[in-house]
Image: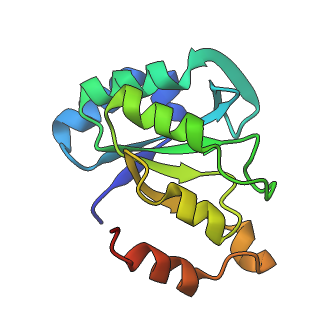
Amino acid sequence: MSFVIIGTKAVQNPEFVEEACKKFAGHIIVGIDAMNGMVATDGWANVTDVKATDLAKRFADAGVSSIVYTDIARDGMMQGVNIEQTVNLATYSGLPVIASGGVTNLDDVRNLKGQPGILGAITGRAIYEGTLNLREAQLLLDEQSL
């Protein structure tokens, strides 16, 4: 195992993440779920007054290796990725971000490819609904940018 992803615990106890980063440098990823840019916790039941960008920046300073960012308004809705917010989070924090929430089809993968700070993407519903062919997506990602 190379990485551990910490979610709600990271929001509720940021010092826990800071300590984990000291003990396991380079192996900690934080999952940030957000609604309209505000962090949500406890399985999305509670939306806080904490900005996702501010939290990501704090964790960048603590030594987190990357962020999994889920736009919960789009997760499972088949409406496309919130690229602007995802790239903004990556740019503001300086951390690589794995986009989650809304990856629906090959166009979403194409639009994410090459965006600054985007490390990868998570998709679920699009695969079992048949709107995203994983093989085609990987072939697209393997193409060299000209």
Indicate the quadrant where residue 144 lies.
Answer: bottom left
Using residue 9 as the reference point, say whether residue 118 is left or right of it: left
- The residue under the point 67% across, 34% down is 42
Horizontal and vertical percent for residue 48? 66, 18
Front residue of 41/108: it is 108
Horizontal and vertical percent for residue 22? 18, 34
Residue 128 seen in the figure: yes
- The residue under the point 46% across, 60% down is 113
Front residue of 7/69: it is 69
Query: Which residue is most to the front?
Result: 146
Horizontal and vertical percent for residue 132? 68, 76
Residue 32 seen in the figure: no
From this view, report whether residue 122 is shown above or below residue 18: below
Horizontal and vertical percent for residue 139? 46, 83
Using residue 24 as the reference point, say whether residue 141 is left or right of it: right
- The residue under the point 71% across, 23% down is 47
